[in-house]
Amino acid sequence: MNYYYEISKTNSNNKFSKGIGFIAGLYEPSYVDEMRCSNATIGKEIKKIDKGYDYKYYFDENNRIILSEKYLSGKLSYINFYFYVNNYLEFIHYEVDSGIYSLSKSYYDENDRICRHIQIGIFEKYNISENIIYNEHLFKYEDNITYVTEITHYNPPQYLIGDRFRERTEITNMKIIDNILYYLDDNLNVKEFYPIRFKIVDGNKVNVKLPKRVPIFKIIKENIIKILDKWINIDKSVIWINCESSDLEMQYTTLKKDNEEKWNIAYYDANEEKIFNDLNHPQVLENLLLNNECNIDDLLNESDYFVNKMIKIIRELRKEGYITDDITVILSDLEIRDKTLEIAKKINNKETINGLLEEFDSYLQ
């Protein structure tokens, strides 16, 4: 604290930012936390501070950050210390009321690019061996690609080891090209990807604007219409929109007789059509759902936001004549459940779903 008072009273090379983001605001020691939370804002630098600020930053004569303050509700709550020694940076995240909160160390290569970052949270201040999580970030640079490996070590105290707690190591592989973050599987193939708020140039973070928000439900409706147009000459009795995952699919049956084959997707012909043909769209849908506190692993039972949007789309398609009244639309996953019947009643004429209700009401009870 003596060092803090010395710097804060004598240093006038300052910047300010507003918006509560991560522990160090605009100057996180490692980029990984920020890029893994691509939808979170870290705030922005401000020039006018008369209306208050959330972070204050202090720089040395070489414009390297050496100290920052984080305020909560106008009160100084955290202080961040940056210590430069040779080719590494030591970082201390200090809670004003409690003491050291976390420690990290960043290593830089001969080109002054971050190549390794290690971090530990000081949960047990008087017995470091009792701390259970240790993070490590490894960076590798190849042409315009930055590869990042995040390694999380869990090392619980002996008295906690059991069915719930155990020693383990989790590894996440990523790469950044321009401002797209790619998650990689064990074979380093792309699993999914997100736009993020920066790209890495020569090891340095360069902020970029995120693309405009994709109007995802508008795209869903447009793609459903394209599929319906392909099926226009087919005498469909049921259209099933499979919501098993965020990459939605549509199937149909032409069966007219009310029996299990008509109301069970397992009997349908292999005529499924993907609503998303751009791999980026399902990921954007997942982001949108997560931001609205929806469970992407159960789109129907725990994601009312998604369900209500889809109901609105089906009703619009009926009103606009793309789906006639004699066609039943089932919004479900691979199994009929209570939620399936509840939704079916909202988007279909009662006469067209009597067979569905009779087939499954007794089964569900």
Image (spheres, rainbow, N blue to C red):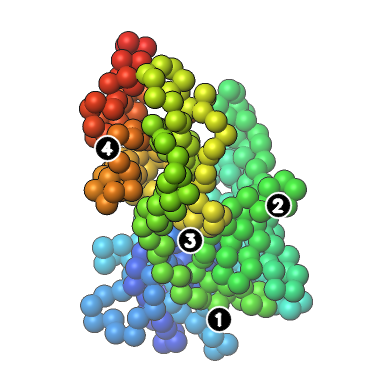
Q: Please say if 111 is above or below 71.
A: below
Name the residue type under label 4: Asp
Spot occupied by residue 271 in the image (x, y as percentages of width and height): 54, 37
Spatial CA span between label 1 and label 4: 67 Å
Tell me what residue is drawn at x 49 percent, y 42 percent: 249
Task: Determine the residue positioned at 33% across, 43% down.
Answer: 323
Q: Earlier in the sequence, mark 3 or mark 2?
A: 3
Q: Is residue 84 left or right of residue 361?
A: right
Q: Is residue 194 left or right of residue 43?
A: right
Mark sitting earlier along the chain (1/4): 1
Q: Secondary structure at mark 3?
A: loop
CA distance for labels 2 and 4: 45 Å
Mark 2 secondary-structure assignment: loop
Q: Position of residue 315 (x, y in %)?
A: 26, 45
Crowd rating for badge 4 (residues with CA inside 10 Å; few <14, some 14–19, many 20+): some
Numbered label attached to residue 189: 2
Give the amino acid at mark 2: Asn
> Image check: 319 left or right of 265?
left
- In three-dimensional space, the C-alpha distance between marks 1 and 2, rounded to whole angstroms, equals 37 Å
Q: Tell me the residue that label 1 is attached to.
A: 64
Mark 3: which amino acid?
Ser
Disc 3/disc 4 C-alpha distance (Å): 43 Å
User: Which image quarter: residue 113?
Assistant: bottom right
Q: Which amino acid lies under the numbered mark 1 shown in the image of this protein?
A: Arg
* Residue holding disc 4: 325
Which label sits on residue 38? 3
How packed is label 1: few (under 14 Cα within 10 Å), some, or many (20 or more)? few
> Eyeballing the image, is 359 above or below 351?
above
